[in-house]
Amino acid sequence: MTDASGSELPAEDPGERTLPPWWVLLLVALAIAGLAFAIGRFTTFDIVASTPADDSAEAGFARDMQVHHAQAVDMAMTIYAKTDDEQLSALAYDIATGQSAQRGEMYDWLVRWGLPQYGTPMTWMEGSSDGGHAHGAAATDDEPMTDAEMREAMGMASDVELAELRAASGRDAECRFLSLMIRHHEGAIPMVDAVVELGSDERTLAVAENMKKGQTFEIEAMTSMQTRFGCSD
């Protein structure tokens, strides 16, 4: 091979052939884009695969515990406005603020999972070890639970009990609150145990475990207050 002047050019060694710089950059860019696409596909698949379903324990727990927490916040704010006892006031404030925050997080879970905020109460617990303990659909006829049955199963206060708490004052109000809230907390623990047993979403399980620890501690604190106040129950 010769150049324009007729001089002989050295033969090209195929083993030494190199790509133009812009080709190198293009290939690198394409490789990075392909890797990013693959990571995105796998990440998206993982998110979809791990999103709890409408009938999952996580979804049922998030719905039912929001209802449960709403009443706890209501009762806590009621006694917070009535009591002069510093320890009980601090406990009521912690319950109201803590459970309000948890309600907000559980609401957000359902939004992110693309699921409705409401469902049939407590049916999600039927596959758990505690599923036959007055939870889920009525055990005798498989009919959905009434609101009163749901409240009783969850350890929640009735409308009459809430009205009596609001009307009470002084030590009577404090003792009523402690009795109702201890029962309320005790009703939440089987729900926590059920979602830990049946669920798999890591954040849900972590919140549930912390919830059980916190409410167990609060039950002990409220039982001690009952003794200090001389409550009958």
Image (tube, rainbow, N blue to C red):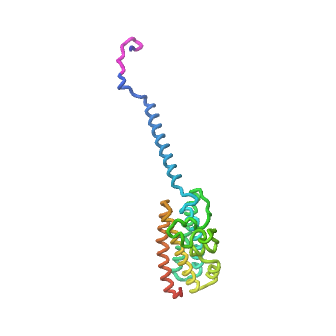
Residue shown at the point (50%, 83%) measured from the top left: 225
Residue 172 in picture, x, y percent from top left: 58, 86
Which residue is more in the foreground, 51 or 19?
Answer: 51
Which residue is more in the foreground, 29 or 201?
Answer: 201
Query: Is residue 122 placed above or below 19 in the rendered structure?
Result: below
Which residue is more in the foreground, 210 or 77?
Answer: 210
Part of the protein shown in magenta: 3-12
Would you say the magenta stretch is mainly helix, strand or loop? loop
Residue shown at the point (35%, 26%) measured from the top left: 16
Query: Is 130 left, or right, of 121 in this rendering?
Result: left
Does the magenta-highlighted stretch encompass residue 45? no
Furthest residue toward front: 140
Query: Is 131 left, or right, of 8 in this rendering?
Result: right
Residue 66 visible here: no
Does the magenta-highlighted stretch encompass residue 6? yes
Give residue 20's quadrant in the image: top left
Residue 64 in picture, x, y percent from top left: 58, 67
Placement of the N terminus among the 4 image quadrants: top left
Query: Is residue 102 placed above or below 7 in the rendered structure?
Result: below
Residue shown at the point (46%, 40%) measured from the top left: 32
Residue 11 in picture, x, y percent from top left: 35, 18
Residue shown at the point (56%, 66%) measured from the top left: 103
Give residue 76's quadrant in the image: bottom right
Residue 175 in picture, x, y percent from top left: 55, 84
Residue 111 visible here: yes
